[in-house]
Amino acid sequence: NTKAYAEAAGYKYVDKAVVASGAFGESGSNITYALFANGSDADGTTYRLVVSGSGKTKYCDWNGASQPFRPYSRQITELVIDEGITSTSTGSFAGLAKLKTVSFPSTLTTLAANTFLGSFDPSVTEFTIPATVTTLGPYHVFGKFDVHDDGVTGADITTFHIENPDVVYSTASDGTLSERIFTNSNPGNVTLIVEADGQNNNTKAYAEAAGYKYVDKAV
């Protein structure tokens, strides 16, 4: 209530639990990020990253190099994307190699190229892409990669639950369709699961074209 009141009435508001915060949107956007300590591990303090506002998150280069929270990215274990965010940009959350949980808003429609490249803790083997997401790619939304040049690659998730079977798999600028949207390794090791009642859909077509395993759990 205090935060809401401060914003409505024009007061300055400070949450002293915030470790770091700042702008995190495209030019003219009101998107911000805030980091909170949420525990510790053998490498030090771990963090929860909360992204708030409306619109599209900041372009952060293919490897996330221009993320404003880059000094903390190796220790982020939890990501919360608040209501109002509609799209990620290239590299927005790349290199979060200890990430274990992601909370998506109902407003999110696009996961852009390299959004989670080099991210996720190896314990994460399954991931759900919500029904609100209508566009993926065109490449490396997920997948292992050493974006920090320190030998830490993140995880290759092996099972994706895709709640919108007809999500659009974007093509690159030259019109090609990348087989590397979900993995930077062998697509044959990754399963795309939908519920489509046996009907043809974009995910089935993409899986067949790119070499992923495909399961329609309604069958």
Image (tube, rainbow, N blue to C red):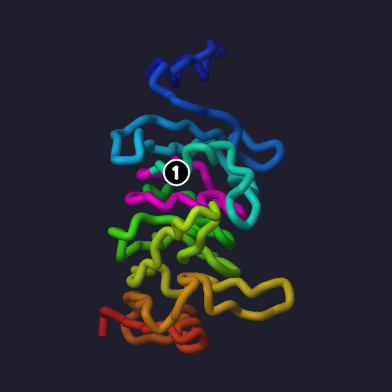
Locate residue 42: give its quadrant.
top left
Residue sitting at x 36%, y 83%: 214
In depth, the one of 54 and 21 nearer the eye is: 21
Look at label 1 and name its amino acid: Ile
Main SS, magenta region, reads: loop
The percent position of residue 60, horizontal first and vertical second, equals 63, 48
Residue sitting at x 34%, y 72%: 158
Q: Which residues are magenta?
A: 77-101
In depth, the one of 212 and 99 nearer the eye is: 99
The correct choice, above or below, for 44 with respect to 15 in the image is below
Magenta-span inclusion, residue 88 = yes
Q: How many marks?
A: 1
Tell me the SS state at disc 1. Answer: strand
The correct choice, above or below, for 153 with respect to 164 in the image is above
In depth, the one of 136 and 79 nearer the eye is: 79
Residue 154 in the figure: left or right of residue 123: right
The percent position of residue 30, horizontal first and vertical second, equals 61, 33
Magenta-span inclusion, residue 6 = no
Residue 84 in the figure: left or right of residue 76: right
The correct choice, above or below, for 96 with respect to 166 in the image is above
Residue sitting at x 58%, y 50%: 64
The N terminus, quarter of image = top left
According to the image, label 1 marks what residue? Answer: 81
Residue sitting at x 43%, y 38%: 49
Q: Residue furthest right?
A: 174
The percent position of residue 6, horizontal first and vertical second, equals 49, 15
Q: Is residue 163 visible?
A: no
Q: Is residue 108 visible?
A: yes
Label 1 environment density (alpha carbons within 10 Å; few <14, some 14–19, many ≥20)? many
The C terminus, quarter of image = bottom left
Locate residue 169: give its quadrant.
bottom right
The percent position of residue 79, horizontal first and vertical second, equals 40, 44
